[in-house]
Image (tube, rainbow, N blue to C red):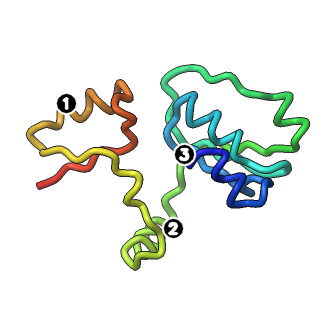
Amino acid sequence: MQPKRVRKLTNGYGADVVVECAGNPESFKIAFDSVRKGGSVSLMGMWGKPVEVPLNEMVMNNITIFTGLVHCDRLHETVQLIEAGRINTNFLITHRMKLDDILEAYRIFEHKEDNVLKIAIKP
């Protein structure tokens, strides 16, 4: 979701919490542009290259940053919420490919081509 849309949906404030999972400079910027003053940004992505961190902006806007890998202690509950339709994850899958094309899928994902987020392998 784009920061302008987040601001519009929150009456100009921004999100209380933003979770960044892609691990690229563009998504990092989107996360910080989407969070409200006093909010939190959680960085879960695996970073392939350095990112410029807006420390002055973070300090002036009292933004808290959390890092680390996702803890899976509530994974079962999360899967149940997805299965029940209470969490929509469909937008995360941007590509669908056959298992025979797995090497091409990895290549596309590695090079972040064609606005890829996640690739689902179809039967």
The residue singled out by tag 2 in the image is 74
Whether tag 2 and tag 1 are in contact, CB under 8 A, the answer is no
* Residue at image mark 3: 69
Distance from disc 2 to disc 1, alpha carbons, whole Å, reads 32 Å
Task: Tell me which corner region of the image, top left, top right, bottom left or bottom right, holds residue 15.
Answer: bottom right
The answer to whether mark 1 and mark 3 are in CB contact below 8 A is no
Residue 40 lies, in percent from the top left, at 74, 50
Kind of residue sitting beneath label 1: Glu
Instruction: Please name the amino acid that badge 3 sits on.
Output: Leu
Amino acid at dot 2 = Arg
Q: Residue at x 52, y 39 (%)?
A: 45
* Labels 2 and 3: the sequence-earlier one: 3
Question: Which quadrant is the C terminus positioned in?
Answer: bottom left
Q: Secondary structure at mark 2?
A: loop
Decide which of 86, 42 is in the foreground and name it. 86
Residue at 73% over, 60% down: 10
